[in-house]
Image: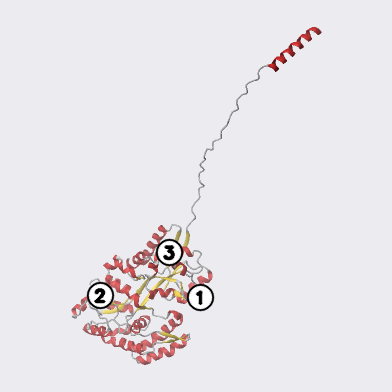
Amino acid sequence: MCKQTIFRWLALWTILALMAACGPAATPTPATIIQTVEVPVTVAPEVTEPPPPVTIVFQEPWSLTSDRGKVVQQIISDFMTANPDIRVVIKDVAVNSAVFTTEVLAGSASDVVMFSEDGVSLFAPQDAFVDLTPYVATWDASKRNDFYESIWAFGGYEGKQYGIPWIAHSMALIYNKGMFEAAGLDPNKPPTTWDELYEYAMALTSGEQYGYGLVGKQGHDMAWSWYNFVRQNGGDLATETGGQWTVALNSPAALEALEFYLKMKDVAPPETTTTGGGEANTLFIQKRVAMYVMGPWAVASIRKDAPDIEVGVAPLPYSQQLATTVGAGLLTVPRTTQNPDAAWRLIDYLTEVENQVKLVSTGFAFRIPTRQSAVQDAWFQQNPEYIPFVEGLGYGHVPTVLAIAMKYNQVHNEVVQPALSKAFIGELTPADALAEMETNGNPLLR
């Protein structure tokens, strides 16, 4: 290409470039504004299984196939329904002292164990139980104060509460109303004093019928029967002086009680030396005796085996003061438990009046509730014969000395029973029998 042509092209490019530079400014493109909106995101909660229920073992003495055992099972079932975080396994074996000691030492004792009235006195000193005092403090006062003090004391030791009374018993005078009417006695006015008891029994004794079913067979039944009379006359079983316990049965009060007890042989069947509590109950059912002393289970037995007998029940006749033998089933928590809170919740549930009444009134009514308000339950209104047993807890005495239960139980078994039997069969005078109780019993209390 010739130089002239090249220069022309360069000139043209230069002119175009200058024209572009001098032209109007370009209109800017508007900026795009972006707004951020937060959208809530719902996250599904993590699905977790509820913790498994804790398992506790409840040891009570009645076979699960018995009437009592079946009622216990139903009550426990109701408890677990109301407390799904607790599973209760029932161990239907009565507690054995030697076995229990071994279980505590091995850490394998049940979580809730029912003991008799002297269980806390025997094992609390060995640090075998959980102190339930803080749990009791959570109760409303109306519940705590509803328990009869005579049996509440069974669960105490050195100012702390280790057992809660669940069920109980007392003794009362049981009599045949039909026999009363036949003898010209008012069936609605049973005897209230020792003198009246003897007079009524004399009026009820005729031919093969006797006024009173006296227990005269050597053993526990006769001893506790006589203890009733000792207490009614203001006597004691043992006393403490300066930290030393001594047998208190060699006293004027106990002597009068024993003399009156032996006097009742006049109005009792001739086979009294072989009559224990069970035999006395049989004699009543057979209509051989018109009156005898027994616990609430006797009423159920009579209704079952002799429904034609119209049963009367009254407080025990007395000389100086109302008194009766009482006992209780205590709910305790061994110190080896891993679940004391769950154990307490079970105890709290079992001692509600409704559940106490349900246990003692279903099937064979063998015990009574431990709370005063129980008599207001409809069942007691329909079965008033059981009310004297409940009210008897208000003036009851345990047939041992709780503060020295282990030692006194030995005196009771090895000294009191044989000496009392000697007096009953005439081998010893009443005074000599009581002196023997004191002489042979005191060394065992040291």
N-terminal-most mark, 1 or 2: 1
Picture quadrant where residue 120 is located: bottom left
Q: Nearer the viewer, mark 3 or mark 2?
A: 3
Mark sitting on residue 36: none
Q: Tell me, yes or no, if residue 62 can be seen here.
A: no
Q: Secondary structure at mark 1?
A: helix
**Tags 1 and 2 touching, CB below 8 Å:** no
Identify the amino acid type marked 3: Leu
Q: Which residue corresponds to mark 1?
A: 126
Mark sitting on residue 312: 2
In the rendered view of the protein, which quadrant contains the N terminus? top right
**Tags 3 and 2 touching, CB below 8 Å:** no
What residue do we see at 45% from left, 59% from top?
86
Identify the amino acid type marked 2: Gly
Q: Position of residue 23 (x, y in %)?
A: 67, 16
Picture quadrant where residue 382 is located: bottom left
Give the answer, above or below, for where 169 lies relative to 210: above
The number of callouts visible is 3
Mark sitting on residue 346: 3
Q: Position of residue 446 (x, y in %)?
A: 48, 86
CA gap, disc 1 to disc 2?
44 Å
Q: Secondary structure at mark 3?
A: helix
N-terminal-most mark, 1 or 3: 1
